[in-house]
Image: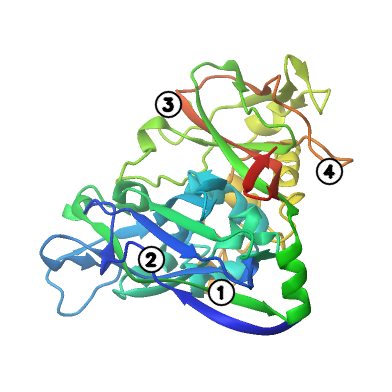
Amino acid sequence: MIASTQKMMITPLNQRSTYSFKNGNPIINFQIGRQDALVQGKSVYFNFKLNVVGPVGMVPGNLPLPGVTANTVVLMNERVGAWSIVDRLTISEASRNAQIEGIRDVGRVLAAVRPASVSPLDYNSTLNNKTLSATRHFITGNLLNNGSLDVSLRLADLSGFLDHGPIPLSQIPLNISLQLAPDAQVLQVDPAHTGSQMTYSISDVTLTGDLLIPDADMARKMAAQDEMAITFDSYTNVYNVQNSTNQTTSLQLGLGAVKSVFTTLLPPDHQNNITVDSFDTPNFATGQPNEDSTIDRVSFLRGSQNFPIVNELEVKEVSAADNPLTPVIKHGLRSIGRWNARLVRNTLMSPSTQCNVQSDVGFEGVPFSILSDISCTERDPLQIYGCDMDSYSGAGLDFRGTTAGLRINMDETTPTGLHSTAIARHTLIAKGQQITVVS
């Protein structure tokens, strides 16, 4: 049994006063060494102070600031929050440097997962305090005015391996590496100002968590154990571009236990572009100003066959009427929520976000209160094309010898980037001196 719990605080192996993408030191490495203890993966936090500055000490000026000579509007995606600075998370076994879990394009994953599985109340309370997330652009933007901000990111909200539970460090000591994202991907500025030179950095970086100390009997059993297995779900990302109005996008996942696949959209010229939101999740667009494409039908495939939904999702009428694509929304939310029960409490998605249908108005068309803009969410769509691949067993389906496909038919479109993410089951097997991860 567990005899006691101790708190740990670890500084990076490559310790610096500040870390930033601009200055060429975007990788942060931690090690939780071999010892007779278990680390509670759910308790591990990545902590730091976030600073956003420009040339000659320019600071964000999202509100009028007395005594500041140069202000500029600097925003961060409010739904992803401070997670947007993390581009990649890698967890490996420390003594052999064998990778256990690697997640790329972290911000794009959470741009779908967070708003699909977290309520507006949590966005403006617990997440706002720890990750700078919020329901509106200006809430997160105004926080950036405060200079140095304390941030705590719970890594188990992203890592299925850490979310599994206690990990015996006597058998699996850990390396945890985080790679920072480019400034142009994290920040969004007004191109009319000198804000294009705004950058971010982090300082006072630590990793904290709980160590579970076993009693003598449990420690002896752990030392004698020669083999163990840990099963966990993790994210795998694939990027494609849709160029035509009737195109099938095939994903070579190479995974043996896929539970679901979901896709969000982003125009290619919005990637790493500091004048736009790189973590937006928009609709397909026609190329005309503020005009979305009319979606005719959506289907999901395994190989060349519709699967697991045999019938195509017919949404032309509701799309042409600018109404929510309810069949698409239902399957998109299920593709995320069913396999992320640890996160799901509610969703940010509403008719307001999807179609700019505002509900917080009185009978005369005016807001119920002057606080309505704070209580409501940003009217930006959360467009997810996703499908639960295994509604019954939960074991996942084998895609090692075939492809997962998404076919979207519409009236017209411009080239659009498709960020697809698979949720798949992985199993870590530790036997003697060998570490293997299979899917």
Q: Nearer the viewer, mark 1 or mark 4?
A: 1
| Residue found at x 53% / y 51% | 92
Total numbered labels: 4
Which residue occupies the foreground of this view, 268 or 98?
98
Q: Nearer the viewer, mark 1 or mark 3?
A: 1
- Residue 285 in view of the camera: no
Q: Position of residue 338 (x, y in %)?
A: 77, 49
Query: For mark 3, does the 10 Å Cα neighbourhood hold few (<14), some (14 to 19), or many (20 or more) residues?
Result: few
Query: For mark 2, does the 10 Å Cα neighbourhood hold few (<14), some (14 to 19), or many (20 or more) residues?
Result: some
| Residue found at x 21% / y 54% | 23
Of callouts 3 and 4, the N-terminal one: 3
Q: Position of residue 67 (x, y in %)?
A: 14, 79
Q: Position of residue 340 (x, y in %)?
A: 71, 54
Quarter of the figure with the C terminus:
top right
SS category of the residue bearing label 2: loop
For residue 394, which numbered disc appears in the image?
Answer: 4
Q: In the image, is residue 251 above or below residue 190?
A: above
Residue placed under numbered mark 2 in the picture: 12
Residue placed under numbered mark 3 in the picture: 287
The three-letter amino acid code for the residue at tag 4 is Gly
Of callouts 1 and 3, the N-terminal one: 1
Q: Quadrant of residue 299?
A: top right
